[in-house]
Image (cartoon, helix red, strand yellow):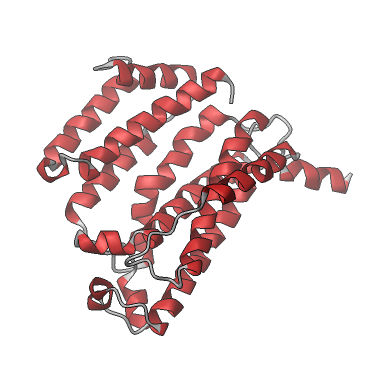
């Protein structure tokens, strides 16, 4: 990316990381809804050009330089509130909303920084839908990778109604048994995550060229975690799926090649003319 865009992405990432640490960091057990309210007030001050510290100042500079909207940031804080109060999700619609709050928002935060290619003929909504889909796909992948880790913390980020339809219960999650029912359930969840990755490709192809490579790298690398879950025979209770360094290295030139291609909307337009 250009240096200015790179600094802006760093500033957004740092804010997201600090927000996540409020509920998942070393002091998470002392976190309260009031503290998150204060954090949201501090966010509004940063957007108004009144930063509290140097890291807030970086965010304030970013929102002054790019047309970044505050609502996705507020929504991410709402996701942190859910982590304090909601350890179960009855349906995928509930889980989808949570995934939007904690990850889909990142796509909406960063598109104004990355920019849309001047060659793109796609609707702006297509790019934002793709960015949202990448955040959702990444979060669903995180959830599927971390089932065992979350269970040990008393949390289940899986649709309970779909577990029931698969003949599974919360006890099956906490006992960590890999059965044929579990494998069947996981296949369905992985298929859904991959569908979001495919939707994300449509938006990634429309970004400014200098922004495409890191987005394609993120997409291709994170999607490989799903392959590793399958390679582990769906044992995400005691085995943590990770992409070996060699596979990561191989993925980078593939991502670079994809970043050099014309936006898909422009390729379609050229084929028509």
Task: Look at the image and tell me in which quarter the C terminus lies.
Answer: top right
Of residues 60 and 238, the one nearer the viewer is 238
Residue 127 shows up from this direction: no
In this figure, what is the number of numbered marks? 0
Place of residue 159 in the rendered image (x, y in percent of width and height, measured from the top left): 34, 69
Give the residue furthest to the right.
273
**Which residue does the image show at 22% across and 46% down from the upper left?**
81
Q: Is residue 163 above or below residue 32?
A: below
Q: Is residue 250 above or below residue 16?
A: below
Q: Is residue 224 left or right of residue 252?
A: left
Of residues 269 and 192, the one nearer the viewer is 192
Q: Is residue 250 left or right of residue 233?
A: right
Place of residue 247 in the rendered image (x, y in percent of width and height, measured from the top left): 58, 51
Q: Is residue 266 left or right of residue 2?
A: right
Task: Look at the image and tell me in which quarter the N terminus lies.
Answer: top right
Q: Is residue 185 above or below residue 212?
A: below
Q: Is residue 118 above or below residue 202?
A: above
**Quadrant assignment, res 45:** top left
Place of residue 35 in the rendered image (x, y in percent of width and height, measured from the top left): 14, 35
**Quadrant assignment, res 208:** top right
Place of residue 113 in the rendered image (x, y in percent of width and height, measured from the top left): 52, 28
**Which residue does the image show at 32% across and 67% down from the upper left?**
237
Of residues 242 and 19, the one nearer the viewer is 242
Residue 22 shows up from this direction: yes
**Which residue does the image show at 22% across and 31% down from the upper left?**
39
Give the residue furthest to the front.
246
**Quadrant assignment, res 235:** bottom left
Q: Is residue 185 left or right of residue 177?
A: right
């Amino acid at each position: 990316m250009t240096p200015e865009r790179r600094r802006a992405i760093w500033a957004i990432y740092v804010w997201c990381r600090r927000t996540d640490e409020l509920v998942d960091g070393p002091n998470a057990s002392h976190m309260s809804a009031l503290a998150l309210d204060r954090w949201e007030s501090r966010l509004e001050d940063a957007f108004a050009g009144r930063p509290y510290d140097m890291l807030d100042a970086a965010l304030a500079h970013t929102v002054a330089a790019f047309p970044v909207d505050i609502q996705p940031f507020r929504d991410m804080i709402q996701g942190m509130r859910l982590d304090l109060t909601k350890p179960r999700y009855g349906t995928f619609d509930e889980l989808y909303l949570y995934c939007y709050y904690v990850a889909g928002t990142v796509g909406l935060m960063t598109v104004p920084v990355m920019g849309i290619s001047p060659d793109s003929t796609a609707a702006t909504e297509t790019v934002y839908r793709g960015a949202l889909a990448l955040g959702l796909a990444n979060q669903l992948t995180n959830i599927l990778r971390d089932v065992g880790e979350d269970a040990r913390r008393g949390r289940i980020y899986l649709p309970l109604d779909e577990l029931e339809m698969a003949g599974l219960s919360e006890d099956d999650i906490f006992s960590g048994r890999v059965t044929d029912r579990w494998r069947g359930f996981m296949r369905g969840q992985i298929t859904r995550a991959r569908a979001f990755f495919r939707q994300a490709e449509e938006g990634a192809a429309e970004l400014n060229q200098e922004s495409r490579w890191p987005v394609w790298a993120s997409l291709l690398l994170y999607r490989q975690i799903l392959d590793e879950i399958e390679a582990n025979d769906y044992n995400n209770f005691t085995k943590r799926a990770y992409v070996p360094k060699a596979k990561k290295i191989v993925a980078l030139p593939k991502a670079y090649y994809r970043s050099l291609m014309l936006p898909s909307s422009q390729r379609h337009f050229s084929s028509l003319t």
